[in-house]
Amino acid sequence: MVDIRQTSSSTFLEFTALKRWYPSSTISQTLPNLSFTVVVVVVVVVVVVVVVVVVVVVVVVVVVVVVVVSYGYTSKFYI
C-alpha cells in the first residue's frame, strides 16, 4: 500500500494513480513538482485547444459567408 505520510490527502488519489507508472521512491520525490507541472500543462493545452477551435470556427464562418455572399450576388445563387 501507499504510505499516506508521504503525501497529503488532496493528492492521495493522484499518488495512487501515478504509482502504477513510477517507482515509489521517484514518485515521493517528484510528486509536488509533477502535480504542479501536470496541472500547468493541462491548463495550457485546454486554453490552446479552445483558442484554436474558436479561431477555426470564426475563420470557417467568415469564409462561408464571404463565399456565399460573393457567389450569390455574382451568379444569382447558382453555387
Image: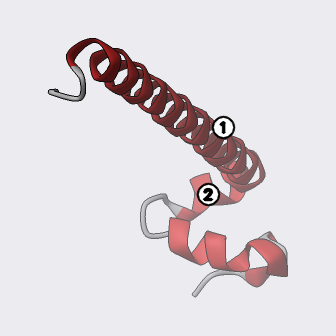
Q: Is residue 73 above or below residue 42?
A: above
Quarter of the rendering containing residue 20: bottom left
* Helix, strand or loop under label 2: helix
Going 76% across and 82% down the picture, which residue do you hit? Answer: 4
Going 82% across and 81% down the picture, which residue do you hit? Answer: 9
Label whose residue precedes the other's in the sequence (1 or 2): 2
Front residue of 55/64: it is 64
* Colouring rule applied to residues: secondary structure
Q: Are marks 1 and 2 in contact (CB under 8 Å)?
A: no
The residue wearing badge 2 is 27
Front residue of 30/71: it is 71
The residue wearing badge 1 is 44
Q: Amino acid at mark 1?
A: Val
Instruction: Specify few, some or many for label 2: CA neighbours under 10 Å numbering under 14, 14-19, or 20 or more.
Output: some
Percent of width and height locating residue 67: 33, 20
Indicate left or right for 18 with 66 as reference. Answer: right
Quadrant containing the N terminus is bottom right
Front residue of 40/79: it is 79
Q: Amino acid at mark 2?
A: Ile
Q: Residue furthest left?
A: 78
Q: Is residue 34 above or below residue 53?
A: below
Going 54% across and 28% down the picture, which residue do you hit? Answer: 55
The residues tagged by marks 1 and 2 sit, at their Cα atoms, a distance apart of 23 Å
